[in-house]
Image: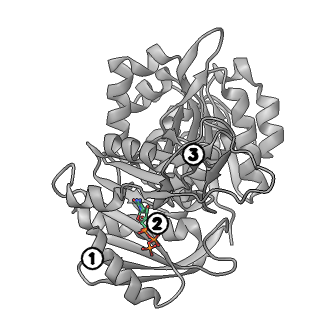
Amino acid sequence: MDKPKVVLGVSGGIAAYKACELLRRFTESGHDVRVVPTASALHFVGAATWSALSGNPVATEVWDDVHEVPHVRIGQQADLVVVAPATADLLAKAAHGLAGDLLTNTLLTARCPVVFAPAMHTEMWEHPATQENVATLRRRGAVVVEPAVGRLTGVDTGKGRLPDPAEIFEVCRRVLARGSAAPDLEGRHVVVSAGGTREPLDPVRFLGNRSSGKQGYALARTAAARGARVTLVAANTGLPDPAGVDVVRVGTAVQLREAVLKAAADADAVVMAAAVADFRPAAYAAGKIKKKDGQEPAPIVLVRNPDVLAEISADRARPGQVIVGFAAETDDVLANGRAKLARKGCDLLVVNEVGERKTFGAEESEAVVLGADGSETPVPYGPKEDLADTVWDLVVRRLG
Ligand code: CTP
């Protein structure tokens, strides 16, 4: 099979050096990458670096190798174009269809999926001109990844950082896997909860569970690659932030409820992949609980936590909002799943059978997605991202 052809556009921002890492990830995983930097990008990273790392020639203008008509061919032959970093200037040129150099020509001739990973100062990102350009590009079907928040060039911090190259790569991998499928969550806001809550007993101990957060992160990542604005409510996960995703960190079930309700207010869909503790200790000891010689430990009294999934399903923040729950079952998986779906009042319930290799901490899983309309969608054993994409397919169908 031919290697997938990727065009890596690089525009002139300091984050250009991070595109070297992105390029390596593509080449090491069997992609044929053609780097098309702008002339300004070469102020930051030279053509020799791009050429050596990609193993392909590098040009910025349409005047090199004119007999090969590169201004048309490179875009036409690509399976994916990703621009990282995309500066405010590049986004403006792309939105307005300017074609002054090889990269902007390539963007006009490409008929494959296009991903932009912007990086700039916060003021430039927030400027209405940039925001309108981003909206235009998204409306036309491009995936524009939200910049990350953090340290910017110089002394400033804020929104505008290029997301981690490994995470941009994950977005591109998902977009490539979907081929020419349109980013069908474009314009949608989705909320995903992930991880496992911890209910503190004292300053050093908690009641927790074994959820790793991987399924929730896969849902967030795949939704971003399908064009959604994603809020990820993450409970005690040690995973890197997915590119373009707004991450809200929480600890307990009560904090998770608050964060989910807030984010769900304007959401088109909410997916509750987090393992939320059903109970919490009735009392929190402000000092560490000490053992006492000759005495048995005091029993731990538990109280019920709010059921977030049942609450948001019963009282939808918006008409037509689609709500998805998860259930891990050991016996009578489908019957228990059906009963739980009815009890919770959600639209879809992903039922996992708990077992070795499956579910907790694993990279793969197997599930059946039950619909309130009686539908049953089996998802064979495979990457958690495949299950995530099936969930989004079912959500998209319900969003209409
Ligand atoms: N959930 C929630 N709030 C809780 C508990 C669970 O929102 N307090 C959500 C989870 O995010 C998940 C689903 O509900 O989407 C799981 O349901 P749950 O009743 O917790 O399943 P089990 O713990 O398996 O229930 P049971 O012990 O009754 O089988």
Above or below: residue 143 compared with residue 15: below
Observer-nearest residue: 101 or 115? Answer: 115
N-term mark: 1 or 2: 1
Colouring rule applied to residues? one colour
Q: What amino acid type is highlighted by mark number 3?
A: Pro
Quarter of image, res 320: bottom left
Ligand 1: does it lie within 8 Å of the C-beta at label 1? Answer: no
Select label 3 or label 1 by which is in front. 1
* Residue positioned 74% across, 60% down in the render: 30
Select label 1 or label 2 by which is in front. 1
Query: Within 10 angstroms of label 3, few (less than 14), some, or many (20 or more) residues?
Result: many
Observer-nearest residue: 367 or 80? Answer: 367
Q: Which mark is residue 389?
A: 2
Horizontal placement of 55 versus 337: left or right? Answer: right
Visible residue check, residue 23: yes
Find disc 1 in the rendering and name its residue: 342
Find disc 3 in the rendering and name its residue: 242
Ligand 1 sits in quadrant: bottom left
N-term mark: 2 or 3: 3
Q: What amino acid type is highlighted by mark number 1?
A: Ala
